[in-house]
Image (tube, helix red, strand yellow):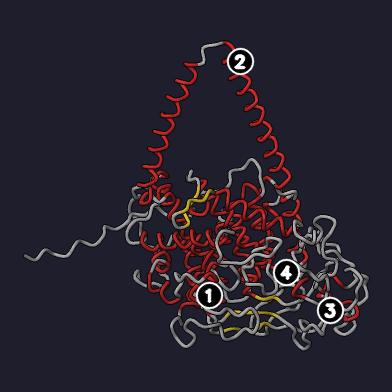
Amino acid sequence: MRKDDKWGGAPVEIEAEPATTSDEVKQGWLLKPENKENGGHDHERNIDGKKKKRRIMSKILGSLVSIRSLVVVGVAILVALIIVLVKIAQRNHHHLNSSSPHNYTTALHQALLFFNAQRSGKLPKDNNVSWRGDSCLTDGNSNTKTLVGGYYDAGDASKLSFPASFAMTMLSWSVIEYSAKYEALGELDHVKGIIKWGTDYLLNTFNSSAHSIANVVADVRGGDHDANSHDCWIRPEDIDHPRTGQECYNCPALAAEMASALASASIVFKDNINYSQKLVHGADLLFKFATKQQGAKYAGGADPSSPLYNSTGFWDEFLWGGSWLYLATGNLSYLQLVTNPDLVGHERALWTDPDNRVLSWDNKHAGAFLLLSRLRLFLSYGYPYEQMLKKFHSQTEETMCSYLPVFSSFRRTKGGLIQLNHGRPKPLQYVVYAAFLAQLYSDYIDAISAPGWYCGPTFYSNVELRRFARTQIDYILGKNPRGISYVVGFSEHFPQHVHHRGASIPHNKIKYGCKGGLKWRNSRTPNPNTIVGAMVAGPDKHDNFQDVRFNYNYTEPSLVGNAGLVAALVALSSGSPPAIDRNSMFYAVPPLTSPPPPPPSPWIP
């Protein structure tokens, strides 16, 4: 492919290292130096005021010549000191009482176990979920290779490529940023195994060894019987009918999302060179397949083929996938694509619509903006990339502002849960991703020693982002009006009637068919199997929650939700490792020399 092909091509040769931008300059981007003039005068006035106060105090002290006066002053100082110490003690006591009582580390261990419970296919010996077994070992199409493996999406037996890809992308992002934390907690190998189980399956959903592809498998579902219908309640282990994959021949959003999953995972597995290269090749195939028909019949609209998890548009997936492919390959054609104003203009991604700030399986704007802001904060990009990267960075800052309670972008419940989906069901999956982004951006600006960022004329400390992330995750873990943890197995009070076929049907060697399992769906007794670590859909906009198995809007967990929970928990967990790994994300990105800007127009006398 030609060097000027904006959809991919041979890597561009890099000649020399660029001039670097200091952290001090990058701090200035956050501290808005253009607004500091008045602040400088204020600082000077404060200094003058302090000097005047010192002169006054000197005169007062000089006039206190009698011993009696000195004693009075000494007593006054002592009393004032005692008062200050008491207030500090009270404030510290309040801080300890108001800080999170929850153990993020314990919650993280549990949240990762959920993925073990969702595995399809032949399970590994160390799966550690006693009530799960091998399932759906004949999944596949007659004209493709096996589709065994992967993950069940939620409480049924569906295997859906779109949400699974997004979940794997977000898990990979969390590992790239916080691998030292995962390792310190003893979970690095576990989370990498979770990701590889997902990417191995995705590689089987298309011809990943070819030079081009014509289709991908969007999902694997019921076959002769619809095992995903709520009128069919069956354990995955008891499904014995054929299940085929639904093939998609024009699904740009899905293919671009799958490309993101494989590209991000290639960075996670960078030390496994053969596997990493296999992932990169697959990601490149998928992205070319996604973009080859861009602007055609379905330009800007939903993917036409899948009735489940249908994307409302694909331009954000192009921005997301192109960003990950640039980081995975260092190929400048991807950076040129994602910083092309035409691409952003297609999606109108820089509109101020608050919904563009909500990261989800269907909307990647906020994630892509933060990922591209990372390039600006930690690397030195000048012309011609800086202009668009600066806009992405500005969008990230506005996203962070929208999370703060002083702004009206999103409402909150009386218990404090931000309503990113405007009071509709299943709110928690959106909340955990916002918490992850907030904590991650706080760690980014900490890494360049900047104390915070601006929302309009007002400066906010990084502490505000951490407070937002913690209060939202604390709500999920039990600090809410109902006092219930929405993560199964965490604390003593958690949902007992999770909408999940495998967890709700006894593991007693009795095979229940679709209809036979309905008695367990309709039962009011707690689930016989505890699906540890599953984050359920969550409460309504009034902080109310119905622990009812049949009502999936309250009690169903999902891959997407738990991936966000894991990412947020590892970001919030404390420990001795550094907050983030600045460099692993850029392992494939070569030194960049910016071309000179275009010369000015010739002077005409």
Vertical placement of residue 64 versus 294, above or below: above
Q: From mark 1 to mark 3, how far is it between C-alphas?
A: 37 Å
Q: Which residue is mark 3?
A: 234
How far apart are the alpha carbons under marks 3 and 2?
84 Å
**C-alpha distance separating marks 4 and 3:** 33 Å
Asked whether residue 538 is in view, the answer is no
The residue that label 2 is drawn on is 71
Q: Is residue 71 above or below residue 79?
A: above
Q: Position of residue 428 (x, y in %)?
A: 68, 66
Q: In this image, 358 relative to 33: left or right? A: right
Asked whether 336 or 601 is in front, the reply is 601
Confirm or deny contact between disc 2 and disc 4 (CB under 8 A): no
Q: Amino acid at mark 3?
A: Ile
Measure how far apart labels 1 and 4 are at the Cα level. 52 Å
SS at mark 1 in the image: loop
- Mark 2, Cα crowd under 10 Å, few <14 / some 14-19 / many 20+, is few
Which residue lies under the disc numbered 1?
210
State yes or no: discs 3 and 2 in contact (Cβ < 8 Å).
Answer: no
Mark 2 or 4: in front is 2
Check disc 3: other Cα within 10 Å, few if <14, some if 14-19, many if 20+.
Answer: many
Residue named by callout 4: 542
Q: Amino acid type of disc 1?
A: Ala
**Separation (CA) of disc 1 from disc 2:** 90 Å
Q: Amino acid at mark 4?
A: His
Q: Are marks 4 and 3 in contact (CB under 8 Å)?
A: no
